[in-house]
Amino acid sequence: MFANYDLISMLVFLVVFLATAGLGVAAFIWWYHDNHRAIQRLRGLAESTGGAALDKPKPRSALAGLPKMGQLLIPKAQDRVTELRTQLLYAGFYNPHALNILLAVKLLAVIGMALLLGLVPYLVGLVHWERALAGCLLGVALGMFGPSYYLRAQMVKRQNHLRRGMPDMLDMLVLCLEGGVSMTAAMQRVTGELHWAHPKLAEEMNIVQREITLGMSAGEALKKFGDRCDLEEVRDLAAVLLQSERFGASVVKALRIHADTSRQERQQRAEEKAQKAAVKILFPTLLCIFPAIFVVLMGPAAFQIAAMFSKMK
């Protein structure tokens, strides 16, 4: 029995060590690859041979094979492909190979989790083949649904970040327009100011600014922004701007009203979360605090009852 406990402890330690080491190596490769590429480019620009050094092949990344692997797993149904691409777009993954990378990660997760939960314990001798098979099925399920759950969580998280920054963006935009700045210059100024407080919203506003610079109107660019991130608030803002441009109404007044409404909605969402917090904290209180209170209150009484029964014997 003790030998099995020692083996389990060694296996758990080995898994934790390998996972920690893998994360550290991946972080180091990511950081070193970017710095190394920048240094190589600067050295190439400094060489007297002109741009010859820039034509050298770039070093292949460790994840360079994921798009090719995922290309083989793309579903044949076009509706499913469109749905996955839309989810990736909502989550902020604008890489053209994002779908291939997602499918490849799913495949690797399925294989890795099946090996970790089923095959490895069976080869070590910790479980029988029935439990190993159940572990493999559990690993396959985790590998299939884990990346999809992460993608949905990223969608919700990104939309919450963007909604949280919309009132601040509208307030700054109204201030710039009231100061006599044009819409293009106001967008540029707001994008620069949002970079520190709301970086995700600043990235999207940078795309909007580029589209306006290329000749698109502000309402159309914001409408594409709302469709790209699936935000009803941005679609409403785009509709306000489009109507103001069509009927010649004051853009500043419309934006001020919309900013007040957006700020009130943010306050209502915060109050709603505050009201839900009292209910959500009830279950951790019941599970964690009350047992400790019962032990403190009932412990002395239990000792007294045990002593009384021992005297009766």
Image: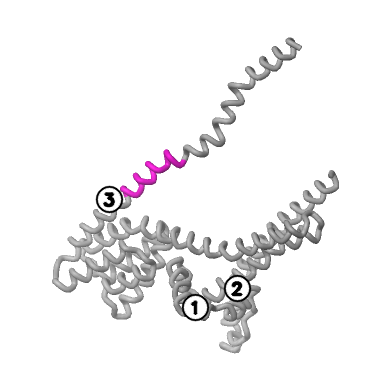
Q: Specify few, some or many for label 3: CA neighbours under 10 Å numbering under 14, 14-19, or 20 or more.
A: few
User: Given the image, on which type of amino acid does mark 2 rest?
Assistant: Ala
Instruction: Identify the colour scheme used.
Output: one colour
Q: Residues under labels 1 and 3: Cα distance?
A: 37 Å
Mark 1, Cα crowd under 10 Å, few <14 / some 14-19 / many 20+, is: few
Residue 131 showing in the rendered view: yes
In the depicted view, which residue is nearer to us: 194 or 282?
A: 282
Q: Is residue 46 visible?
A: no
Q: Nearer the viewer, residue 44 or 274?
A: 274
Q: For the residue labelled by badge 2, is the local secondary structure a helix, a strand or a loop?
A: helix
| Disc sitting over residue 264 in the figure | 3
- Mark 1 or mark 3: name the one nearer the start of the chain: 1
**Disc 2: which residue:** 104
Q: Residue 131: x percent and y percent?
A: 73, 56
Please tell me which residue is depicted at 76% across the width and 12% down the height of the picture.
Answer: 313
Name the secondary structure under disc 3: helix
Q: Position of residue 227 (x, y in %)?
A: 35, 70
The quadrant in which residue 121 appears is: bottom right
Query: In this rendering, is residue 176 above or below 57?
Result: above
User: Magenta segment range?
Assistant: 267-280
**Kind of element beneath mark 1:** loop
The answer to whether residue 275 is magenta is yes
